[in-house]
Image (cartoon, rainbow, N blue to C red):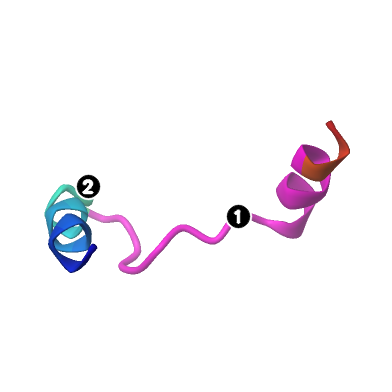
Amino acid sequence: MTLKQKAIDRTTPIGAKPGRYQPPDELIAFLEAI
């Protein structure tokens, strides 16, 4: 898992915020509703 995360971290676009994507609450609510 750590190796996969390191590989993903290397593909982060320039100018993107570091860290994992945190979807907004509205998106989570929408996905739970479908």
Q: Determine crowd level at label 1: few under 14, some 14-19, many 20+ residues with C-alpha closer than 10 A.
A: few
Residue 32 covered by magenta stretch? no
Identified at 31% across, 56% down, the residue is 16
Q: Which of disc 1 and disc 2 is earlier in sequence?
A: 2
Task: Give me the C-alpha separation between circle 2 and circle 1.
Answer: 18 Å
Q: Amino acid at mark 2?
A: Pro
19 and 34: which is toward the camera: 34
Q: Amino acid at mark 1?
A: Pro
Q: Quadrant of the C terminus?
A: top right
Mark closer to the observer (2, 1): 1
Q: Considering only vertical position in the picture, is 19 above or below 21?
A: below
Rendered location of residue 28, percent (x, y): 73, 50
Residue 20 covered by magenta stretch? yes
Rendered location of residue 3, percent (x, y): 13, 62
17 and 2: which is toward the camera: 2
Q: Which residue is under mark 2?
A: 13
Q: Is residue 3 left or right of residue 29?
A: left
Q: Secondary structure at mark 2?
A: loop
Identified at 35% across, 68% down, the residue is 19
Q: Secondary structure at mark 1?
A: loop
Q: Which residue is under mark 1?
A: 23
User: What's the magenta region?
Assistant: 15-31
Identified at 19% across, 59% down, the residue is 9
Q: Determine crowd level at label 2: few under 14, some 14-19, many 20+ residues with C-alpha closer than 10 A.
A: few
Q: Quadrant of the N terminus?
A: bottom left
**Quick one: which residue is furthest to the front in this view?**
1
Q: Is residue 27 left or right of residue 29?
A: left
Q: Is residue 18 left or right of residue 34?
A: left
Q: Is residue 15 left or right of residue 33?
A: left
